[in-house]
């Protein structure tokens, strides 16, 4: 039996997701069982340090050098914590698969720059703390093949969710929204995946600003508000929404600068709860617009990620596609919170077996490739 | 037969050293043969970009993200070039071992920072360009064990230079000077290594400033100048010189800011050639002061690195230790230029075999460990 911990730290900076997983087999024969899951929280100080290195203005080589190691220690702690919670001896761990914290993603750079991506959270530190082999840096190889290095979860979704009869559509709503469409009996080359636009990123930024809350719990603020159609139209006019796939986006397009610009223009005209409602509808509508060409009434539309707990957001999506079965990931049998961390274990397992795990149709890469780097403990 | 290319890009930014090496065995039974060597030059533009990310002020997350990939392409080109020069088919290459470009090294950080180091030159890019397994990031694991992550070459020196009768002292003079002392019949735990202080770093900065030359060719400027004893004393008073080993230094202590400060104070009082002569004597004297406790007249004092071509520097060293046999690395049978790139192959070979290659006595690490991360091509 092989046990592994998958680590994911997303753009929303909620903390480090750590999933202790039992895994066997490889490729389409992979079977996984979630043993335990935790989110190891970041302190306010750590969040500030990460935000510092997100920004061109406040980042520096010294901060990035230091934070790479600091996050390594936190990732190592997250592994220890999830094992402890499961009463599982860390000595029996076979590997750790760590996504790291993306601090920059530049898939379509300006002329003097190179297409690139940067994740930090030093694997050598995790390796030494856990005395286990660590696989890390899953996005760079795909970009070396002219892919966008994102999305990263479709391979694991293909392995775990494919069905013989029904279209399985997986909509993850984290900071960013991303979709994976798996036709019935699909081969890897039939899987399509791309970012749909913002997920919770704008909603969270508004809740922070208006209510000093990290997110809109259960979608309550949005439920109390009213969608402003003019603002919604302006948001939907963002060129990313109707861009053809493969496409990826991030904090660079929908981060704090984007929200700040919206606020400057609209803050005096719209009530906070209406602002949140409109941002929520923007996320819902951008998802549905992007999903529509791929779905029929034989589709399972499965929503995961933090956004799946936002009831208003889920209701807004369902209302626009009344004939499609909209489900929450938990209803299908997988933990929504743990999904990306579990995906890392599946990717790391492939890497250890020298097997590929990117989805060229999703990332735009020239071909499948072994992702990630291996730091062997012994 | 195993063929590999080792890549090194040092603090002096001369370019990428690429050594095509035939290697067999592991550990003390390692045998290497240098097949071909090139220095793949950096353009002025690339040098400026690297210098930009060295500096806290001018660096940014975007520049580092992009340059990591850009250097990956240049490292990949260097591999192709050295194979081409040797008329060696890149398909027959078994692996590439890449040190990367150090852009920051923080072994003894201030309170809010973490001990850390950062090398760039994305291995996934090298991997895809050369269609070969790449081993990279050799310094981080040692730092995870409370080592300084430097020096990095002593393991290879131990393997290649140990002797049954004589002390082998290896003094590398790159941007920084570093020494390795291998007692007769040494075991790994008897090997001592540390940085002695600046190598060519100050000399080169002065030649750039006074003569618009990258370095003091053959030590000619120094030969024409006269050592200023007051300036020399001030330089020798730098606390690093008499610090106890293990110790490492870098651009942070002896880089452009250090030289600028010296120039401000002394420029009007000393002629350029005397300034260069004094800086050269400083390098010589700091090396000898650090070496003295370890040598006797049964010692081979072997000088390597770019500084070994500076005849004035070598002469200054010999003059201070008249009873010791001072040799240049080429006289012992190894290319001085290629030494560090060859060392990377030895380290990478250890990593591929899951074997350690740090020298705890040199770095201060708690114990030996497998260094580096492996990016498998297939």
Image (cartoon, coloured by chain):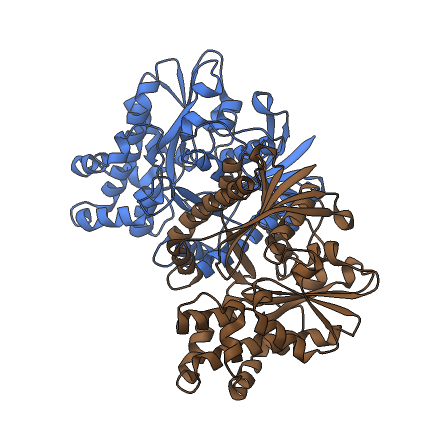
Chain colours: A blue, B brown
| Above/below status of A260 relative to B222 | above
User: Which residue appears at 80% of the width and 71% of the height?
Assistant: B298
Side of B150 relative to A329 (left or right) = right
Residue A93 vs residue A329, the one in the foreground: A93
Which quadrant is the C terminus of chain B positioned in? Answer: top right
User: Which residue appears at 45% of the width and 14% of the height?
Assistant: A184
Residue B342 vs residue A321, the one in the foreground: B342
User: Which residue appears at 50% of the width and 27% of the height?
Assistant: A368
x then y, percent, for residue A251: 35, 45
x then y, percent, for residue B56: 42, 63
**Residue A17 appearing in the image:** no
Residue B85 vs residue A202, the one in the foreground: B85
| Above/below status of B357 relative to B257 | above
User: Which residue appears at 50% of the width and 57% of the height?
Assistant: A65
| Above/below status of B2 relative to B328 | above
**Residue B334 appearing in the image:** yes
Q: Residue furthest top?
A: A165
x then y, percent, for residue B132: 57, 36
| Above/below status of A294 relative to A214 | above
Number of numbered discs on residues: 0
- The answer to which quarter of the image holds residue A316 is top left
- The answer to which quarter of the image holds residue A377 is top right
């Amino acid at each position: 039996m092989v046990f592994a911990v998958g680590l994911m730290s997303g753009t929303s900076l909620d903390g480090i997701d750590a999933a202790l997983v039992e895994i066997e087999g490889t490729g389409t024969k992979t079977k996984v069982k979630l043993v335990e899951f935790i989110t190891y929280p970041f302190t306010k100080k750590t969040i500030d340090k990460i935000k510092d290195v997100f920004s061109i203005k406040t980042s520096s080589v010294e901060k990035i050098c230091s934070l790479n190691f600091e996050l390594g220690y936190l990732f190592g702690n997250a592994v220890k914590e999830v094992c402890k919670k499961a009463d599982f001896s860390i000595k029996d761990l076979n590997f750790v698969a760590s996504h790291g914290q993306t601090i920059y993603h530049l898939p379509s750079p300006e002329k003097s720059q190179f297409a690139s991506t940067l994740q930090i959270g030093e694997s050598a530190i995790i390796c030494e703390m856990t005395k286990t082999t660590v696989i890390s840096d899953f996005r760079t190889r795909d970009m070396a093949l002219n892919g966008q290095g994102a999305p990263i979860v479709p391979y694991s979704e293909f392995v775990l969710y494919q069905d013989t009869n029904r279209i399985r559509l997986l909509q993850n709503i984290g900071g960013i929204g991303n979709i994976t469409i798996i036709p019935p009996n699909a081969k890897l080359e039939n899987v399509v995946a791309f970012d749909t636009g913002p997920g919770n990123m704008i909603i969270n930024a508004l809740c922070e600003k208006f209510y000093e809350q990290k997110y809109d719990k259960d979608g309550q603020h949005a439920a109390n508000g009213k969608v402003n159609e003019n603002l919604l139209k302006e948001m939907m006019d963002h060129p990313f929404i109707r861009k053809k796939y493969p496409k990826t986006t991030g904090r660079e397009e929908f981060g704090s600068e984007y929200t700040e610009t919206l606020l400057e223009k609209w803050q005096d005209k719209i009530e906070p709860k209406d602002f949140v409602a409109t941002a929520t509808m923007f996320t819902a509508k951008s998802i549905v617009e992007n999903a529509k060409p791929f779905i029929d009434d034989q589709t399972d539309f499965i929503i995961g990620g933090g956004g799946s707990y936002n009831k208003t957001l889920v209701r807004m999506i369902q209302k626009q596609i009344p004939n499609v079965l909209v489900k929450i990931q938990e209803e299908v049998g997988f933990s929504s919170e743990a999904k990306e961390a579990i995906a890392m274990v599946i990717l790391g397992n492939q890497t250890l077996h020298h097997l590929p795990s990117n989805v060229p149709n999703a990332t735009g890469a020239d071909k499948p490739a072994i992702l990630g780097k291996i730091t062997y403990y012994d």
